[in-house]
Amino acid sequence: MSKLQPYFHSVALDIENCKGCTICIKHCPTEAIRVRDGKARILETRCIDCGECIKICPNHAKIAIADDFDALNKYAYTVALPAPSFFGQFQGPDVTVGKILQALLTLGFTSVYEVAKAAEHVSLAVRRYVEQSPIRPLISSACPAVVRLIQVRFPDLIEHLVPIQAPVDIAARFAKEDIMRKYDLKPEQIGAFFITPCPAKVTALRQPIGLENVWLDGAIPISTVYAKVLRVLPYLEDTPELQEASALGLLWGRASGEEDAVRAPKQVAVDGIRAVIDVLGEIEIGKFHDVDFIECQACRGGCVGGALTVQNPFLARVNLERLAKELPPESSLQLEKSFEERYNAGDYGLELNIEPRSILKLDDDFTKAIEKMELLEKTVAALPGLDCGSCGSPSCQALAEDIVQGLATEADCVFVLRDGVQSLAEDLLELARRVPGSISHEDEM
Amino acid sequence: MAAAGNKQALMSITYDIVAGDFVRGGEAAGKLKRVLQQLGLGANVIRRTAIATYEAEMNVVIHSYGGQLSVDITSETIEIICSDCGPGIPDIDQALQEGYSTASDDVREMGFGAGMGLPNIRRSADEFSITSTVGEGTQLQIRILHKAGE
């Protein structure tokens, strides 16, 4: 992204609901939240929109800014792009992929295009890229929160990211191209809406990484669509002709789905942001050098564990796997151009480089950074090291960094403050005990 | 480091390394990496330093009776000395060959001991030297050049 603009974030604070507790600051993987003046604040440059704070906040004060059904009214033709994880939200023996797609049509979409179908294309493209690239290990770029995590915390791993577009971006493009051809419409007349499990994808839509042309027009959370679909689902006839994706694509909705589809000789699937951070740290020091491909998903359980899903991720996984059993294992990709043509034309590839966005640097100037580093060490040593979070920063180390950057003071630490008050009180007492010569000690009694 | 003596250390850090502690093994390299990131050094410099110090640290954990990782950061270089008390290396040339290792089977089962430690350090460093006295210990000197502020 070369455009200099303030960062847009899907993850935002509902200030009314925030009690100023410090639970979210402790769970943020990039230490992007501070509590100041009794309310949580998100530091824009650090936030990767992973949604961990949305999941952990007991007061539902962390929300995702996304689109609603109103957005459909702007377009002559609308197409719903349900994420593979969407299908795992529904259970029961009568549920089929066809019925869920039919339900989306009853909600007002003109047509549907399964992101799972695009995931099959992406699987082939990634498989091909892994065969051709000498870089090891290659890391999947499908999870936008992981891509952002790498930008801010592991910038030297950017070259390990597979520069292939995420399934939803491919889906939006293929769906629109198809509709344009069939109905002779212009791209701006068609609204392509992702039914999304995660806020990171909403952010990616407004602030794309590695893409110049975004075909997607909006993202509606699964949690917004869920109840509406649930209401109509029992009354629908099965419509198998709507369903085009195979099991290979559908299973991308849960952890290890991409790995299963890419089929690299030696591969690893990692899910959960903490596990991802551990693995990325180990890749940096040269471990995993003999692994060909690593699937990294910020959410535990994969996309079914996304912050905007409704169903328990373990149940959603089982639901997804049951649906997948009814589908052909792999489809012959129906395309007006062949996969080969598309791959060689670069249709699947990212259009721009992914840029580093390191957040750890204390100062752009090396000498100043050294000075700040020295101050930082002294400051850390003066703090209690309990990482209690009462100051509003996630740890003593983080508070020290905030102090060095002028964003907090030592008195924000309740322990430093208490020591200060105590020594002040002792001084006061000492002063109070000193009696002027004109007053006798007995008078004082 | 003699050659670096004319370059004044702007910052010095020393980490202790405990022999046989695989749980903490890698922490020193990890902490150093964070410091270098905070100083805003280039990704390539950080990565090479991380690999070299991690491998050096793990060598101390695996082979020695304990040691230290000392780091001086100057305006142009990162000077690393990793020294240990231990059995020493009888044949340094052999130890520098890829795939040569004296690590025990237990250690190999944990994924270490592939004989890539010293070769990886040498590859990551801009300057590298090793001295070892059998029965006393080993000292590695690693220099990595960083263009300030990059």
Image (cartoon, rainbow, N blue to C red):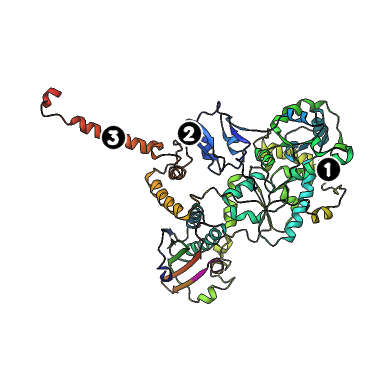
Q: Could you tell me the amino acid type at mark 2?
A: Arg
Q: Which amino acid type is marked by label 1?
A: Glu
User: Which residue in the protein does label 3 denote?
Assistant: A424
The residue carrying pointer 1 sits among few (fewer than 14), some (14 to 19) or many (20 or more) residues within 10 Å by Cα, namely: some
Name the front one of labels 1 and 2: 1
Residues at marks 3 and 2, CA–CA distance in whole angstroms: 26 Å
Specify the quadrant of the image occupied by residue A71.
top right
Which tag is nearer the camera, tag 1 or tag 3? 1
Q: What stretch is highlighted in magenta?
A: B120-128
Q: Is residue B139 left or right of residue A291?
A: left
Q: Position of residue B22 (x, y in %)?
A: 50, 57
In the figure, A393 relative to A135: above or below?
A: above
Q: Residues within 10 Å of mark 2 (few under 14, many from 20)?
A: some
Q: Residue at x 23, y 31 (%)?
A: A429
Residue A202 numbered tag: none
Q: In this view, does A22 lie above or below A163?
A: above
Please name the residue that numbered disc 2 is placed on: A36
Q: Do the numbered discs 1 and 2 sit on residues whose CB atoms are within 8 Å?
A: no
Q: Quadrant of residue A70?
A: top right
Residue at numbered disc 1: A177
Question: Which numbered disc, 1 or 2, marks the residue that appears first in the sequence?
Answer: 2
Q: Which amino acid does label 3 sit on?
A: Leu
x, y percent for residue B54: 52, 60
Q: Position of residue A357 (x, y in %)?
A: 58, 49
Secondary element type, mark 3:
helix
C-alpha span from label 1 to label 3: 73 Å
- Mark 3 or mark 2, which has the lower sequence index? 2
